[in-house]
Image (cartoon, coloured by chain):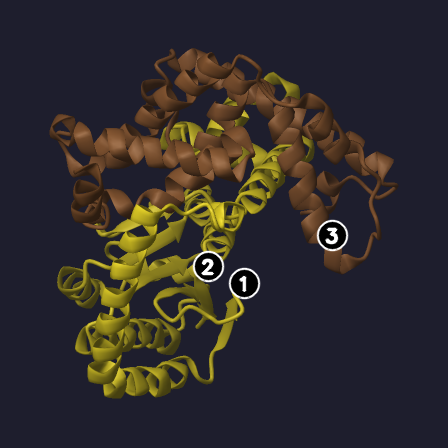
Chain colours: A brown, B yellow
Amino acid sequence: MSLISQFLFGPFRPGLETMRPVLYRIAYAWCHDPALADDLVQDTLSKAWARRAQLREEAALKGWLVSIMNHCWLDHLRSRRAFEDIETLQDALESPADTPDACCNREQIIACVRAAVARLPMGQRQVLTLVDLEEFGYAEVADILGIPVGTVMSRLSRARASLKTMLDQAARQHGVEPVLRRVK
Amino acid sequence: MNSSAISDETLHAFIDGQLDIADSEALIVRLRADQTLAQRVCGLRSLQSMVRLAYAEPPGAADVRAGAARGGRLLQRCAAGCLILLVGLSGGWALRSMDMQAASAQPRLLDGYQSVSLAQQPDPSRIVLHLDGDEPARMETVLDRAEALLDEADRQGRQIELEVVTNSHGINLMRVGVSPHAERIARMTQRHANLHLVACSQTIARYTSQGQKVELLPVARAAPTAIGEIVYRLQQGWTYVRV
């Protein structure tokens, strides 16, 4: 029965389905694990479909979905206890660059930034990714995560400060000029 | 004034577009005078673009899950796949002539213009037209160009977004009482909801400091800086054309 309903309803949720890539990007930025991110998105979309009557206006769809995903993510963390495998992330961040060619520079920056974001405390990571990746306003982020706007601002500020420190350090270890300075 | 007097939180709010217009304009004025402050903002902006870059293409879960697809999912995907293939084939056949038209029309429209795109294939459906002077011929060209692109897209049933960004003397195109094309612009924006007009706040501040009152047409909005707006659009994959 569930198979049939999945077959019937699965592909026919155009409004929700179009949000899949957006949700996946956020989920990946939170957990840095493709399989887990995919599960989170799937879970979020199923819950959203079940509760679709609660959504009052179409414009609020994205924020509403992300707040559902936040609950799924918190549930997951609670059930799992262990957070991130810090050691592997640290390795990824501090591993020496293979070749500082211009062509792998981009990949290198991407890997470095991801590793640094992964090392941020969860609260800061969520605020940073919602503001930077999805351009949510501070009030919207506060609403989605259920925290005061002041907390959003202070977490964002701390997140960007530590991110900058980590990236500067990583850049120095690689013996290149800090990337932050070069981009003008 | 000392740039450290402005808190990090304020600068974050500024780059995230969370300050109100008055505060952001005041900050823009200070930024021009204060090198250190400008550097702090620049640092924050590049940090933000690096985060965006880092997650622009997250690794897909599909590769990780290959082979893990269960029977039900597989069946569903097959059915959906066949349907899409069928729709695609018949749709493609029906639209082939339109497509060929679009393919040949698009480069021609942007021909002879200095266009820039960060994407490998310039996106013809999201275009920024940039005007930084008020020579009558250029003002007219930018509107002609915008109208041609919008009408062409309408005829072909394509969705496009078009933004006209002005700075320096170019903002005269969007000033009440100064623009020679106010009526035409009003007509165009009424006909095309996908046409956006943007003026540079720095230019407005400069005019204001020279004692000229700048009032924008109601359909135009002010961005903190024209260059910032253009870079932002380029990062979003828009194609830039300087007129």
Asked if badge 1 and badge 3 are on a common chain, one would say: no
In three-dimensional space, the C-alpha distance between marks 1 and 3, rounded to whole angstroms, equals: 17 Å
Which residue position holds label 1? B118
Asked if badge 1 and badge 2 are on a common chain, one would say: yes
Residue B72 lies, with reference to residue A61, above or below; the image says below
Residue B92 place in picture, x, y as percent: 26, 79
- Mark 2, secondary structure of its residue: loop
Residue B224 place in picture, x, y as percent: 44, 42
Foreground pick, B211 / B9: B9
Give the chain letter at badge 1.
B
Residue A135 seen: no
Residue A23 place in picture, x, y as percent: 38, 38
| Res A2 → quadrant | top left
> What amino acid is found at the position of numbered circle 3 in the picture?
Asn
Disc assigned to residue B237: 2
Which residue position holds label 3? A105
Residue A157 place in picture, x, y as percent: 56, 20
Q: Residue at x 18, y 68 (%)?
A: B184
> What amino acid is found at the position of numbered circle 2 in the picture?
Gly
